Structure formats: C-alpha cells, structure tokens
Amino acid sequence: MASLKLLSISLDTVDSRKLNFTANPPQLSDHFPIFSFTMSCIVTASNRVKHVKNVSSSETDLCSMNESKETDIGIENDVGSEVFVGECSNVSRKVKKGRYGVKKGSKRDVDMSLRFRRSAREQEREYFFANDGELDVNYSVIGADLSLDECNAILRRLEKYSDSKSLKFFEWMRTNGKLEKNVTAYNLVLRVFSRREDWDAAEKMIREVRMSLGTKLNFQLFNTLIYACNKRGCVELGAKWFHMMLECDVQPNVATFGMLMGLYKKSWNVEEAEFAFNQMRKLGLVCESAYSAMITIYTRLSLYEKAEEVIRLIREDKVVPNLENWLVMLNAYSQQGKLEEAELVLVSMREAGFSPNIVAYNTLITGYGKVSNMEAAQHLFLNIKDVGLEPDETTYRSMIEGWGRAGNYREAKWYYKELKHLGYKPNASNLYTLINLQAKYEDEEGAVNTLDDMLKIGCQHSSILGTLLQAYEKAGRTDNVPRILKGSLYQHVLFNLTSCSILVMAYVKHGLIDDAMKVMGDKRWKDTVFEDNLYHLLICSCKDSGHLANAVKIYSHMHICDGKPNLHIMCTMIDTHSVMGMFTEAEKLYLNLKSSGIRLDLIAFTVVVRMYVKAGSLKDACAVLETMEKQKDIEPDAYLYCDMLRIYQQCGMLDKLSYLYYKILKSGITWNQELYDCVINCCARALPIDELSRVFDEMLQHGFTPNIITLNVMLDIYGKAKLFKRVRKLFSMAKKLGLVDVISYNTIIAAYGQNKNLESMSSTVQEMQFDGFSVSLEAYNSMLDAYGKEGQMENFKNVLRRMKETSCTFDHYTYNIMIDIYGEQGWINEVVGVLTELKECGLRPDLCSYNTLIKAYGIAGMVEDAVGLVKEMRENGIEPDKITYTNVITALRRNDKFLEAIKWSLWMKQMGLQD
C-alpha cells in the first residue's frame, strides 16, 4: 500500500470514519491525551477507493475469495467490509511480499464474471415489486425451490431498505428451511436488530444459531454486534457480546479486538480493555491499534507504569509499530515528564523510516512544558522548520501553556500574539493561562482583551466569569475585578440569576460589600424568592466567616429594598446581633417579626430563646417558651429540649422540669447523648432517684458514654441517698473510663462525711492522694464539717493543721464551718479569733457567716451581740433572711428573752418570712 501522510486536522472536523487512522488534532493539550486513532484494520467500503490508492484488483479479489470460504456475509455491503477488510489488508500485504502465488485473472474470466452478474441481477428483479413506493418481495413468484444464494441475495437487498420487510422475509426463509447453517442470513438479521437496538432479540438469535451450528459458530456474527456497539458507544453491551463470544468457544479475530479496544478507549474502561488485551495476546493475535488503545487508556488515567509495560510488550511480541504506535509511546513518556525516553522514541521512529511529524514535535513540546523545561521546548520549536515542517496551531498553543506554567508572561504573551497573527484561534486552556498570568502581573488592560477573545471563540459567559474570578482570587486581587468586568459580560451578570449570585458571593467573600450591593442594585432579573435566598446566603457567609458587621451592612441594604420580613433572614440576624452582644437590636427584630403576624417555626423559637439566654434574661426566655407551647404545631427537637431543661433548672422550676421530662418521654423523639446528659444534670433534683437511675442505665445500654459532669451528678445523687454500693460501682466504672476528676473525689468525700461514715471518708482522701490528686479545699471543708459535728475536735484540729502546712487558702465556707463548730462547743474566744482572721485576710462576713455568728452568740449567751449583728448586716448591705431571724429568736428563747422573741417572730410574720 502507498504510505499514508498524517494530516493536521482540527479536532472539530476530524471524522474517524473516513480515515484508516487519524490522530487527535495536533492541538496537544495538557488536559487531554493527544491521540485517538481509529482502528487501522477497518476501512469502509465506500471510502476504500479514496484512501487505499494502490491496491491491485488481484489483492481485492483474493480478500473476497478468502472470506467467501467461511461465509457469504456480503463483502460488498457496509458491515461485512468494515468488519473483515482488515484481514483482507493483511492478506494483501502478504501478496505484495510474494507469499501467495496468485496470478491475475485473464480478460476472458472477467467478461464471463460480468455477464454472470448481469444475468443474476435480471433474474433477481423478478422477485421484487414496488409496494407504496417501497421495495417488497413478490411472494407469489418465489417458492421453496429458491437456492440458498438467491434467498440470501433477496434478504441482503431488503436489509438495505426495510427492517420490517427483512424480518418478514427472514421468517419466510425459516418456514421454508432456508436457515440451516446459513450464517449469512443470521448475520444480516443481526444487523437489523443492531440498528433497532433490540439486543434481547439479538441475544436470542445468537443462542439459536449456537444450537443450530454448534462448533461451526464463528466470529462473524459477534463482530456484527460488536461493530454496532462500537458505532453507538455501547461499552457494556460490547463487553457482553465479547464475553458471550468466549463462552461459546468462538475465537475472535484481529477485527474483533480492534473494535473492542477502540470502544473501550472511548470510555476509558481500563478493566474491560485489560481483559480483551490479555485475551488477544493469549490467542497470539497482533492488532497494532489494540496496543495503542491500551497505552492511551493507561496514559489518560495516569497509570504510567502500566503504559510502559505495554510499550515493553510491543517489543516482546515483536510488533512492528505503525505511526499510531510510535505517537502514543511518545505521548506516554511526555505526559509523565520522561523526556529523555520520549526523545529516544522519536529517534527510533525516524530510524524505522517515518519522516518528521508535527504531531511528534508538538507532543515533545507539551511534555517539556509540563516539566517547565522551556529552554528545551524553545529549541524544539526553532528546530521544526529545520526538518521541513511548519509550526501549527497546536504548536503555538503548547508553547503558550508551557510558558504560562513557567510563569513567564512576556513569552506566553508573544506566542499568543503570534498565534492570532497567523490566523489561528486560542483554545480555552490558553485563555485560562493568560488570564491567570494577567491577574498575577497586574495587566488589567490585557485581561479585558482576553475576556473579549473568550467571547469571540464562543466561551459561555458563566464560564468566563468563573475563570476571571478564580484567576484574580488566586492572585489575591479580587478587588480589581469590578474595574475589569464590563460590557456584555457585566450585562450578562445583571440578567442571569446564577452568574449574578456567583459574582456577589465572590465579592462578599473578599469583603467587597459595596461592590456586591451595587450589583444587587443594578440587576435586571426579578425573582423575589431567589433574591431573598441570595441575601440570606450572603448574610450567612459573613456570619460564618466572622465578619458580623458585614452581615449587618448587607441586611441594612436588603431591608431598604424590601420592607417585608423574611423569617429565615430575620432569625439569622437575631442570632448575629446576639453574637455581637447587641441584644436590644436583636429583641427589636424579634418584636418586629412577632408583630408582622408571621408564624415562627422551630428554628425561629430556638434562636430567640438562645438570644434571651445569652442576654441573661431567663424570664423572657420562659415567656417565649410559653408562646411556643401555645402554638400546637411546634414539636421541639432534642437541642431545643436541652435549652428548655437548662433554663428551667437555672430558674429553679422543678415542676416544669418534671413536666418537661415526661413530655419528652411521650414525644417519641430519638435520644442522643446530649439529651441524656442534659436530663440527668438538670433534673437531678426534680425526678425520683429510681427514674434518674433508669435513665442513666438506658444511656449506657444505648452505647453512650456519659460525660464527667453526668457521672459526678450521679455520684452526688447516690451519695445523698446513702446508696454507697452504687457509689463505689459507679466510681469504679468512671475510673476505667478515665472520667474521674477532683470533683468526683470531693463528691464522695462529702457524701461519706454528711452520713457520718468517717472511716470511708478518710480512706477516700487517702485514695485521692494515691491516684495523684492533691487534697482540695472542698475535701478539707467536708472533713472539718464532719469531724466537728461528730465532736472529734482532735481530728478537726489535725485537719486545720494539715491545711496550714499545705498552704491551703481558706474560703468563706471554711471560716463559717469553724465559727459553727466553735460556737456549738461554746468556744466564744475561738469564734472571735476566727472572725478576726476572716477580716485580716481581706474577707468580710457573708450571710452564712452572720447567721452562724448569731447562732454561736446565742449558745454563748451573748444575746445583745447576736441582735446587734442584724444591724451590722444591714449596714454592710446584707439583707437578713429567714435563717437569720430564726437564729435570733432561738438565741432569745435560749436566754429566756421570750417577750423579745415574740416581737421578732411578729416582725418575721409581717415580712412574710414565717411559715
């Protein structure tokens, strides 16, 4: 065959069906594998003459003879020729090399053949007639005596014109016994099923032929189906027919693998491609395009080691590489930056007799660009003309990409100008590279021109906008975008909702609030719902990034534009003002929302409740919760239930806590760990101990690990209930979980002390020290209180001594315990000493101190001093409580001052302090 010249063909105009093989356009891109070849083993009948110039008639006849020995599948028809002409080409090459002793036929033989064909066609015309302008079979003139060849000729003619009539005649053939071992007929009908994409019928027919022919079933039927899948890009179906082919013990031929690998290459299906490729090698077949497809797939998926393995197999299998093979090998090395190996491939390609090729040079230039070796790329560019070639569109595009990757704006700009000067068009990648460089090097004028070029080559406005924003954001110069964005592109933004939202989001992200609001003011689209959602998104963006002032600014602009409240925006702004500590503004928004008549939803109530909690206004928070309860359609979620529990706990509303707990149980809500912890911590004083214990056990059963606060609360509950076995069990579990802290020990020590279990209290203190904890002030206070109330004054003094030795600072509670214990003992001098020490350390008596002193003075018979303390309390700004008056009355009665005691009792009653 004559040598084929590789043409530089645009990606937009290349038609793989019209060439023996074609390369991807010479516009080599960094983003795509550069070569996509059609199978060299497939040539259509219609273009056989156009593209295979020097094939002798003897070669063509030999192909036909060779195929007709297997079956008359119709070489002259489209499918037959396309599927099998590859093998014909192989045979033709053998004829050229003298491997087949075939002589040219004489002129007499040709004349006889022509006369026979004319006679056959005249006879064939009798079998057809025109039915409503369509060709149909004249069933009145045909009978069971028709030969197999005549039946096949009729079916072949019908298959070209009408699917339905072809299937009808096929059934006639079945009825008249014309299908036995008739592969040609089955093949033609499979073409019909393929066109109609009736794959179920095709599969059924394959199984029917298998039953009929058995071991005589060959590749022709399957190739017909695989070819149809190849044309339609049906990868899974193509793989299915191939696997069925193997299941039927049918050996594929070269054309089978050529079509399959081309199909897999289109979809980058590496698994199926590997399977087919391995099957081809096992059968000892050689399809050059299969090797190319395998390398291309691996290269596209960055599986470079596997691609190199296939290159080694080309040598191992002694494949004589064609131009396609050389180019994909060159690309495989270039894509991964192995330029030395790529250059060796180029040298080998020349040694194999292939002339210099612009695609090869472009591939190498792209490879050098990927590794930023632009000196070598520049040398190759200058060398192109020396070898008799001219740089094409792809060459300039690759140079632009290479210089852009190297960050050299001057060189990239020069090649871009040359590209346009020569009448070529830049691709999207070139323009993306340029806009990035212009953003980096502050060339706003050049950026405007690049945007115009993008519009000229047909880039979508939204794509251009995205590229512009990405480039300037990467360069940290988004604030320059408003000066560049103008003309038709800006008009597009004003009329397009999506582009407008993308632009204002970018502006807000970089703090360009005024520019974003200008765009919102200039916009020409009208969609109230979309606009509200966009404003909400902008406000949330500012809030999430911590730019709360910007959120307020955006809301102010939106509020001027449209005075109608939006529930979601208002809730977000209430939360924003709360975070900023602007509770007055937040409350105004809530009252405005409330007065608008808009029904609040769950989120709105949650936001408002938390706003009041942050402001410290628990009373208002409770009022909001009452309003929510009146709105029957609101069912709190776990998070709001937790907020409600905390509020009621802080307000000491035990009845509300109990009511809310049982409401949660009835609600059927799914409990999470936070809800379990919150219920136990908040309802410890509001629920029976058995119920709390049940909740805690349920929490453990559901696999939740309680936090350390919950464990300490349960320790306190069990301790106060004198359930010390549970205390020790829970404490042991907490230790295993690593959730024991000082408070845990303090809680247990206090529980033992209050229940006069002094031995366990002392051992717990020792355990605390053994586990590495220092004895806390709270633990010392518990011991002082326990020893003092039990009258163990020696142990009491020992604890005080240890506190002083460890430099433990006393607090009010410590001094109050000492006053109480000394007072109970009647040691008034020690009481006075403690009071003096209290004042010397900078502390003043608190309410508890005064109440304890009054009690101590009463016991010591110092009634007047006890009464005088009440006056001192008021002078120090401490209001006496019920305990104060009770202690005074007790002191008076203890010292026989009954009349005075009655007066104080009446005062208590008048002040509402008496039960």
Image (cartoon, rainbow, N blue to C red):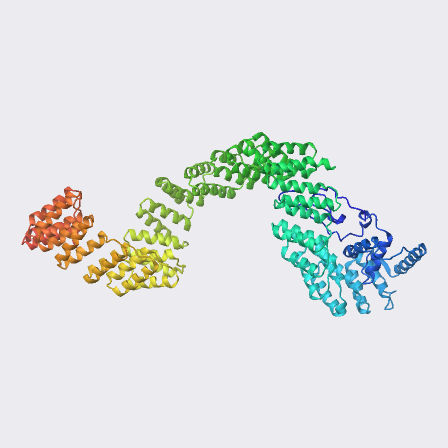
Which quarter of the picture shows residue 168?
Answer: bottom right
Relative depth, front residue between 800 and 438: 800
> Which residue appears farthest toward the top when viewing the image?
445
Q: Is residue 376 visible?
A: yes
Residue 494 shown left or right of residue 881 in the figure? right
- Where residue 208 sits, quadrant-wise, is bottom right
Q: Compare residues 130 and 163 and report the one nearer the observer.
A: 163
* On screen, residue 396 above or below 1: above
Image position, residue 718 (x, y; %): 27, 62
Between 306 and 605, the one nearer to me in the picture: 306
Name the residue at 13% across, 48% down.
834
Specify whether 372 is left or right of 325. left
**Total numbered circles:** 0
Q: Position of residue 841 (x, y in %)?
A: 17, 43
Name the residue rendered at 31%, 55% in the picture. 709
The quadrant in which the C terminus is found is: bottom left
Residue 888 location (% of width, % of height): 11, 51
Extreme left residue here?
896
Does residue 613 sit above or below 492 in this rendering?
below
Residue sitting nearer the eye, 781 or 642: 781
Image vertical order of residue 102 relative to residue 213, above or below: above
* Residue 161 can be seen in this image: no
Where residue 791 appears, as percent x and y from the top left, is 12, 59
